[in-house]
């Protein structure tokens, strides 16, 4: 019988402080220019930052103090002390990092930016909050301009962020690393609950996600809504994983093996669809569009990161970023996955719960647009509405199932201010932000932090007294 997750009883008042402080600080950030480039000088980017941080410094200090007292039961074997969060970002996007402090409290973070000059340009008030937020900077430069056209300056930094975080902290200083974009939100209570309930061993190499890009051939139509999250993508289930529904028919074409660990050889040996040509061929490289979605985030074990030689990984990433775009996906998340697949030999592991339940997407259910009133709404604002319905006692069993097994939400900062649902739900905030995408996403960081705290407080007893599969629904 798996261990049961601990209760997390957090006062709703604390969440309210988080929300109000987040709103104030985010509105102040709204006047800052949003850019992924160093074309704007640091002094211009942060010209108003000093005054802004002076205004919110004391409320932030009080909020941090309150949140620091809202810790999980220390008698449990896992806590936020066991987590390390790797955040690829940039000088211009630090407002998102600042906003994410509201849900990262208690865990350590490595924030990777583009240069030491950028670090020097960060206002002292921001730096002054780093100790309480348990943040440390690391550096990896922007890509040089050039082909392919879809390269973003921070792609190499995104690919290298987990390895920089591991190098900075040391693989023995944590058990699990959380890796996503700076607009990825992790529901830490659920992350800890899942890792404990499944009794996953952090010493085993694990790359955990259920949100995978997959296209078997570039001859297929490039349709993002079909390419990810792809239920047909090859993956393993955790070592020794069992599920009440595993004997029933399910909608996945690829029969996921139990990976102990999930290696290339393991997947190829169980390649029932001959996706990789079977065990004899085992050609993973032929699939350009096969990688974990960076915005959805992933959980990496310390055992995985111990396999990595920093120099080898850096050499691979730098070479991949200059590769042929017709044969290589050169996004940050694509290259990171290639490092795991081809350098470390480790493939994705699905947590398992959503594998047998098509209504569950544990890592970022916010990608596909769906109805926001019923039980399937998946845009970021629709996930917010799920929480709101649950807190008012109006969430269906399927809706509760999704929320109780939710790991991450991708805010999609580039699209946040244009989301029509966002306009419906938060018109005042959108107006105040002037439709600025970064201010909108920063606000949503804060909003999700509030909802997580409220939901964990309201469901604390339920989480403590029920096993992982207690709200499992029959296969549809």
Image (cartoon, helix red, strand yellow):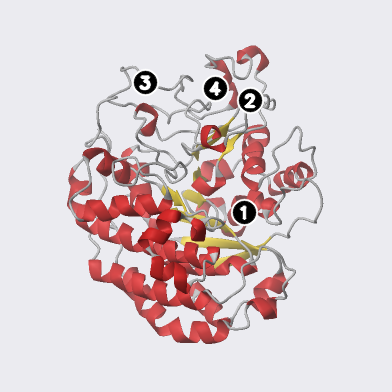
Give coordinates of residue 109: x percent, y percent. 51, 61
Q: Which residue is mark 4?
A: 266
Label 4: few (<14), some (14–19) or many (≥20) C-alpha neighbours in 10 Å: many
Query: On the rendered image, what quadrant is the N terminus found in?
Result: top left
- Measure the alpha-carbon separation of dots 4 and 1: 27 Å
> Which residue is rendered at x = 37% and y = 30% of the image?
358
Disc marking residue 161:
1
- N-term-proximal mark, 1 vs 3: 1
Would you say 133 lies left or right of 147 here? Answer: left
User: Foreground mark, 3 or 4?
Assistant: 3
Q: CA distance from mark 2 to mark 1?
A: 31 Å
Q: Residue at horizontal 35%, vertical 74%?
A: 20
Q: Secondary structure at mark 1?
A: helix
Tag 2 and tag 4, C-beta contact below 8 Å? no
Q: Position of residue 140 (x, y in %)?
A: 70, 59
The reply to whether residue 206 is in sight is: no
Q: Earlier in the sequence, mark 3 or mark 4?
A: 3
In-front residue for pair 412/471: 412
Please tell me which residue is depicted at 32% across the width and 42% down the height of the picture.
402
Position of residue 344 in the picture relative to residue 300 (left or right): right
Instruction: Residue 389: tell me if it is visible.
Output: yes
């Amino acid at each position: 019988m798996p261990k049961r997750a601990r209760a997390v009883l957090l006062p709703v008042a604390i969440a309210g402080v988080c929300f109000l402080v987040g709103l104030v600080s985010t509105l102040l950030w709204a006047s800052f220019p949003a850019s992924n480039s160093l074309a704007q000088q640091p002094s211009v980017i942060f010209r108003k930052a000093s005054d802004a941080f002076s205004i919110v410094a004391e409320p932030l200090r009080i909020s941090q103090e309150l949140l620091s007292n809202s810790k999980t039961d220390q008698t449990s074997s896992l806590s936020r002390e066991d987590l390390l969060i790797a955040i690829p970002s940039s000088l211009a996007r630090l407002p998102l990092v600042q906003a994410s402090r509201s849900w990262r409290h208690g865990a350590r973070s490595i924030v990777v930016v583009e240069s030491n000059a950028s670090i020097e340009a960060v206002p002292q008030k921001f730096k002054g909050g780093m100790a309480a937020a348990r943040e440390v900077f690391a550096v990896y430069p922007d890509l040089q301009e050039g082909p392919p056209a879809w390269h973003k300056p921070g792609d190499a930094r995104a690919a290298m962020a987990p390895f920089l975080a591991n190098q900075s902290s040391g693989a023995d200083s944590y058990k699990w690393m959380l890796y996503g974009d700076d607009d990825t939100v992790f529901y830490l209570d659920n992350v800890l609950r899942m890792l404990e309930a499944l009794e996953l061993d952090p010493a085993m190499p694990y790359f955990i996600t259920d949100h995978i890009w997959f296209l078997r051939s570039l001859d297929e139509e490039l349709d993002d809504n079909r390419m990810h999250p792809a239920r047909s993508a090859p993956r393993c289930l955790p070592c020794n994983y069992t599920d009440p529904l595993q004997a029933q028919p399910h909608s996945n074409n690829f029969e996921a093996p139990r990976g102990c660990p999930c290696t290339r050889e393991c997947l190829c040996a169980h390649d029932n669809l001959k996706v990789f040509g079977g065990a004899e061929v085992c050609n993973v490289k032929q699939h350009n569009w096969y990688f974990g979605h960076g915005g959805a985030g992933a959980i990496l074990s310390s055992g995985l990161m111990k396999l990595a030689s920093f120099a080898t990984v850096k050499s691979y990433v730098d070479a991949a970023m200059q590769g042929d775009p017709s044969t290589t996906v050169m996004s940050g998340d694509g290259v990171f996955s290639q490092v795991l697949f081809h350098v470390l030999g480790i493939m994705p592991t699905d947590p398992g719960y959503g594998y047998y339940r098509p209504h569950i997407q544990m890592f970022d259910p916010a990608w596909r647009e769906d109805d926001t009133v019923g039980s399937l709404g998946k845009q970021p604002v629709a996930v917010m509405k799920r929480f709101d319905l649950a807190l008012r006692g109006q969430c269906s069993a399927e809706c509760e199932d999704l929320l109780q097994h939710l790991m991450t939400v991708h805010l999609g900062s580039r699209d946040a201010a244009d989301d029509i649902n966002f306009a419906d739900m938060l018109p005042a905030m959108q107006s105040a932000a002037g439709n600025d995408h970064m201010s909108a996403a920063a606000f949503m960081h804060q909003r999700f932090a509030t909802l997580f705290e409220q939901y964990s407080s309201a469901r604390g007893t339920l989480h403590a007294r029920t096993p992982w599969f207690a709200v499992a629904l029959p296969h549809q």
